[in-house]
Amino acid sequence: MTNRTPVDNAIAGPMRGGSHEPTFSGVASFMRRRLTKDFTAADLVVWGIPFDTATSNRPGARFGPAAIRRASSVFDGDPQYPSRIDPFEILSVVDCGDCFIEYERPQDAPASIEAQARQFVDAGVELVSLGGDHFVTLPLLRAHARRFGPVALVQFDAHQDTWDDDGTKLSHGTFVTRAVAEGLIDPRRSIQVGIRTISPADYGIGILDAEECHALGPGGMAARIKARVGPGPAYLTFDIDALDPAFAPGTGTPVAGGLNTAEALNCLWQIADLDFIGMDVVEVCPPFDHSEITAIAAATVAQRYIQIKALKLRERMR
């Protein structure tokens, strides 16, 4: 029998390389990354934002970060698909836990999320955020726009999130309205993918609705996204309800007719050459999930993004 020293990778494992502990045990950090508040040696930080006070329908997305982390444990130390590499041999990634939000003061949440996000962004560390309802993208965009200026928004979603907002609402359905009004995004370079609801305005943002997505396929979708965004910094926000409820039942506002998981992941892989400076995956609502279907999809979206970043870093190092 081979002697093995038990290692809980999230607490005491090496910073480099994948984890080889059983997927069913251990502390559930994202993909078994070191769970720490020290990100000084990190290229990328995974960070949870357990906030769902701005949701308009089914609550529960505050439990999303924990569910995504649990689902990500299936990505063990084997080479990752489709890159066939261990991204952590190239990219230093840590899990910095969750944003601290005082639930008794929801009105303070936007400033709190932004201030805590800026610690990472201002330090030049890339941020992958796990929501949380889609309102959390607004303070994240504020933090990124302070450093990069107005960015192109690539938004996978069933909804445009452009409802009216006088600047005082806490709503996951108005974050795009506020982002445009505050100059955080460049509508001429921004695009919303998978849309299958009607909103009062588009603010000049490109729309690739679900019917078009199904007709185009992943390659056609990717071509349209890349043509719209072009060069320059872009931010990726992936609302899990971009997927059809058959593939993501655990979400706050499910809408039939969406993308399937394979379409979305394939499209993401084909837009890897865009200049993404950060991303989030939001609206995972575990109380309505089944067999972790939704959480697995969300974890895979973030995992694909990390693979993309590792491949890009490897290319720069050559």
Image (cartoon, helix red, strand yellow):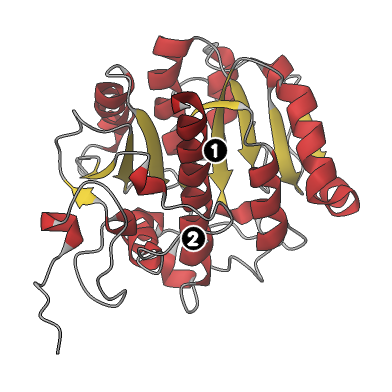
Indicate the position of residue 8 as horizontal and vertical percent values. Answer: 15, 65
Identify the residue shown where x is 80% and y is 42%: 221
Query: If the image is split into quadrants, where does the N terminus sit?
Result: bottom left
Q: Quadrant of residue 129?
A: top left
Q: Nearer the viewer, residue 176 or 307?
A: 307
Pointer 2 residue:
58
Disc assigned to residue 180: none
Give me the residue at 30% from left, 52% from top. 17
Total labels drawn: 2
Q: In the rendered view, does 92 fall on the left or right side of 141? A: left
Q: Is residue 50 left or right of residue 196?
A: left
Q: Residue at x 28, y 68 (%)?
A: 20
Tell me if residue 98 comes above or below residue 63 in the rendering. above
In this image, 126 relative to 291: left or right?
left
**Secondary element at tag 1:** strand
Q: Which is closer to the viewer, label 2 or label 1? A: 1
Q: Is residue 78 left or right of residue 45?
A: right
Earlier residue among tags 2 and 1: 2
Residue found at the far right of this picture = 215
**In the image, what residue type sits under mark 1?**
Thr
Q: Residues within 10 Å of mark 2 (few under 14, many from 20)?
A: some
Q: Position of residue 220 (x, y in %)?
A: 85, 42
Q: Residue at x 48, y 36 (%)?
A: 309
Cα distance in 3D space between marks 2 and 1? 20 Å
The quarter of the displayed image where residue 100 is located: top left
Q: Nearer the viewer, residue 148 or 191?
A: 148
Element type where label 2 sits in the image: loop
Q: Position of residue 275 (x, y in %)?
A: 58, 24
Q: Mark 1: few, some, or many residues within 10 Å (few <14, many ≥20)?
A: many
* Mark identifier at residue 237: 1
Q: Are marks 2 and 1 in contact (CB under 8 Å)?
A: no
